[in-house]
Image (tube, helix red, strand yellow):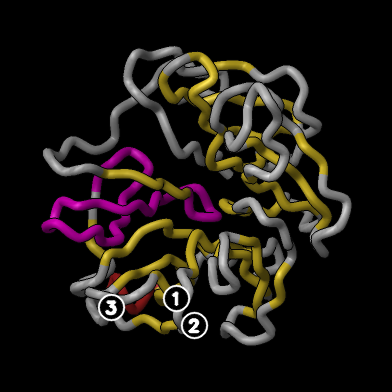
């Protein structure tokens, strides 16, 4: 759809669920997760008009939350194999398109690691993990080394997203529940080193999947503040939130065109 919510166009038409879309850096392709091949989710790619739908992962795991590297050569995603935790993997796009499909598991351990987000320079990856108990935001090098915890709260913090200039991180948290909205999920922003945490939303509703506009001036997200889940856009300081989908069905997981 357009940024104002007009002209929504359907790109996939499957009996199984397709979700979690992400634009390629050059704006020519979209990667997403789908259950069309069976009970487990797999990663797929298509052209921006919905043509050329191609399966990228061929495994027995549950694969979702794909995210492109800034150079467009790799896709990070999380996978859960049977009986294990979610871990983050890297897929080489040219190899996957050539049918080789081999990926690289860059996290491992007893905790669930997921929802990767690349730094704009392609050198680091943000992710959420419950490796230390509850969900918190972490950062690591692209090879999985040097993992560092950025948030430390009794409540869950998740769904991190880098700002285009690499200086800020938007995320979701339940840390400030009050009498009217105890335990609900709100959107926050912090500096790239975890300092300067600022709350952007404040209502008795849940907020999910913040994503920055390419110029860093706006954040799109999904919320059930008007009943069912809709897509909203607000200024980067949290002001002027606007519902741009207004539909009786749930609308989720916005992704900005580059």
Nearer the observer: mark 1 or 3; the answer is 1
Compared to residue 212, the image places residue 26 above or below, namely: below
Q: Residue at x 40, y 27 (%)?
A: 251
How far apart, in angstroms, are the residues tagged by discs 2 and 3? 16 Å
Please tell me whether residue 48 belongs to the stretch shown in magenta.
yes
Q: Secondary structure at mark 3?
A: loop
Disc 2 on helix, strand or loop?
loop
Q: Residue at x 41, y 20 (%)?
A: 228
Q: Nearer the viewer, mark 1 or mark 2?
A: 2
- Residue labelled with disc 3: 101
Left or right of 75: which side holds 239?
right
Residue at 25%, 71% (x, y): give it. Answer: 61
Q: Is residue 62 left or right of residue 6?
A: left
Instruction: Identify residue for label 1.
Output: 90
**Badge 1 element:** strand
Discs 1, 3 touching: Cβ within 8 Å: no
The residue under the point 39% across, 47% down is 20
Please identify the quarter of the rendering in which residue 85 is found: bottom left
Marks 1 and 2 in Cβ contact (< 8 Å)? yes
Q: Which residue is mark 2?
A: 106
Q: Is disc 2 surrounded by few (<14), some (14 to 19) or many (20+) residues within 10 Å?
A: some
Q: Earlier in the sequence, mark 1 or mark 3?
A: 1
Q: Quadrant of residue 126?
A: bottom right
Mark 2 vs 3, N-terminal side: 3
Quarter containing the N terminus = top left
Residue 167 on image: x %, y %: 82, 56
- For the record, the magenta segment spans 23-51
Q: Nearer the viewer, residue 126 or 135?
A: 135
Could you tell me how far apart the alpha carbons at marks 1 and 3 are, in whole angstroms? 11 Å
For mark 3, does the 10 Å Cα neighbourhood hold few (<14), some (14 to 19), or many (20 or more) residues?
Answer: some
């Amino acid at each position: 759809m357009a940024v104002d919510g007009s002209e929504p166009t359907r790109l996939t038409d499957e009996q199984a669920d397709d979700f979690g879309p992400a634009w390629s850096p050059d704006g020519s392709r979209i990667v997403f997760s789908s259950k069309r091949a069976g009970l487990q989710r797999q990663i797929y790619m298509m052209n921006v008009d919905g043509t050329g739908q191609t399966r990228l992962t061929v495994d027995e795991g549950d694969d979702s939350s794909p995210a492109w590297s800034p150079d467009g050569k790799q896709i990070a995603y999380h996978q859960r194999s049977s009986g294990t935790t979610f871990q983050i993997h890297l897929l080489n796009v040219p190899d996957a398109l050539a049918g080789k499909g081999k990926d690289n598991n860059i996290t491992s351990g007893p905790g669930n690691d997921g929802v990767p987000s690349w730094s704009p320079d392609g050198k680091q990856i943000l992710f959420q993990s419950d490796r230390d108990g509850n969900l918190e935001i972490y950062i690591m090098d692209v090879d999985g080394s040097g993992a560092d915890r950025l948030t430390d709260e009794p409540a869950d913090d998740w769904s991190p997203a880098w700002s285009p200039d690499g200086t800020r991180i938007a995320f979701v948290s339940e840390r400030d529940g009050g009498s009217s909205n105890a335990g609900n999920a709100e959107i926050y922003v912090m500096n790239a080193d975890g300092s300067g945490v600022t709350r952007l939303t404040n209502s008795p509703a849940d907020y999910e999947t913040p994503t920055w506009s390419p110029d860093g001036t706006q954040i799109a997200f999904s919320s059930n503040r008007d009943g069912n889940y809709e897509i909203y856009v607000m200024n980067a300081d949290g002001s002027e939130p606007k519902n741009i989908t207004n539909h009786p069905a749930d609308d989720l997981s916005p992704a900005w065109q580059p």
